[in-house]
Image (spheres, rainbow, N blue to C red):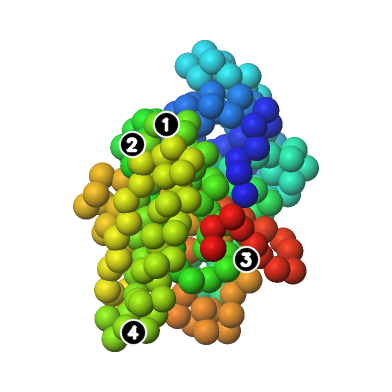
Amino acid sequence: MLIKENSSILIPIDFSKQSLIAIEQSYSIAKFTKSKIIIMHVSPKSNIERQTELDELVATTMKNSGQPTESLNLKGDIYELIDAKATELDCALIVIGLDTQVRFRSFMGVTNVGKFIKQAPCPIITIRSEDNRNNCRNILIHIDLSAESREKVGTAVQFAKYYNATIKIISVFSPNDEKYENELLPYLNQVKKFIKDRGVSCTNKSIASNNVAEAIVNYANNNDCDIIIQMNKKDLSIGEMFVGDLSLKVVETSNIPVLSVKPMVRVSISSSVH
C-alpha cells in the first residue's frame, strides 16, 4: 500500500511533549505527499477543552510546515475515535506520538492502543523517541517468506525516493532452522534487485535470532536507521494472543519511528517481487 498523495494526515494529540513532536515530524511527509494536516485533540470531558491552545497550534503548524492545517476537538477516548475519524476523513496516514510507558498487551488480546493500530484504515507512523527525524537517510524493512511481507516494499521505495534514502533489508531466522535460511536468502536477493531496479540504493542482511522484534530494533539502532517499515497484521492467531504479535512488539519497543502498513485485502497476494 502506497501513501496516498493530495489527501490528509491525521495527528491525534493530548498536548504531551511526545504528541507535539509527532506534529513536527509530520512536516516533511506532508510536503512530499502534498497533504493537509489535521490535528485531533480528544478530551474525556469536553469537546471545547483547550480550544485556544489548539487554535494556536494549528496556526504554528501551518506556518512551520507550509501545509494547510485544520483541527478537530472531540469528546471521548482518543484511541477509540482515531480509526473512525481517519475513515470518515479518508486520511492517507496517521502520525501519533506514543508515551514510552504505553503498553499494548492485556490478557487474551490487546489494549485500546493495540486495537486502534490493528484496525486502522490507513498506514500509521508511531513515534516514541524525542529525537527529530524529519530527515530520513536509512529505511529498514524486515522481510520473511509470508505473502504479506512483500507488500511493504512499494511503500519503502516511495519513502526512499522522497528522501533519497537507502533501504536496508533484514531477515531474521531461527539459529536452528537451516532450511528456512536457505529458502530466504535467494528471495532477499530478488527483493534487493527489485528495489535497485527502481533506482534506490539497497543492502540486505540475515540475522540468526529467536527474538525477531528485538533483532529488528537492535539492527535499526546499530545501523543509523530513521524509520522501520512493517506490515500491520490485523487479525491475531490464538498463539499470538499469548506470545504477542510481532508488529505490535516492534511498535512497543522501538525508539525509532515505525510505519505500519495495512495489508491489502484480496483472496490471493501477488507482486512484481517473486
Q: Please, is residue 68 above or below residue 135 in the view?
A: above
Which of discs 3 and 4 lies nearer the camera? The answer is 4
Q: Are marks 3 and 4 in contact (CB under 8 Å)?
A: no
Q: Please, is residue 237 above or below residue 112 in the view?
A: below
Q: Give residue 137's mark.
A: 2
> Position of 178 compared to 152: left or right?
left
Which of discs 3 and 2 lies nearer the camera? The answer is 2
| Residue position marked by numbered label 3 in the rendering | 234
Looking at this view, is 34 or 114 the one in front?
Answer: 34
What residue lies at 47% left-to-right and 31% top-to-bottom? 162
In 3D space, how far apart are the residues under numbered discs 3 and 1 (Cα atoms)?
Answer: 29 Å
Q: Is residue 170 visible in the rendered structure shown here?
A: yes
| Residue position marked by numbered label 1 in the rendering | 163
Looking at this view, is 21 or 14 the one in front?
Answer: 21
Q: Give residue 65's mark.
A: none
Looking at this view, is 269 or 244 the one in front?
Answer: 269
Q: Amino acid at mark 2?
A: Arg
Q: Residues within 10 Å of mark 4 (few under 14, many from 20)?
A: few
Identify the secondary structure beneath mark 4: loop
| Residue position marked by numbered label 4 in the rendering | 177
Q: Estimate the x, y position of residue 198 in percent, counting from the top left.
A: 48, 40
Q: Amino acid at mark 4?
A: Asp
Q: Amino acid at mark 1?
A: Tyr
Q: Please, is residue 63 above or below residue 72 in the view?
A: above
Q: Please, is residue 274 above or below residue 211 in the view?
A: above
In 3D space, how far apart are the residues under numbered discs 3 and 2 (Cα atoms)?
Answer: 29 Å
* Mark with earlier residue (3, 1): 1
Q: Amino acid at mark 3?
A: Lys
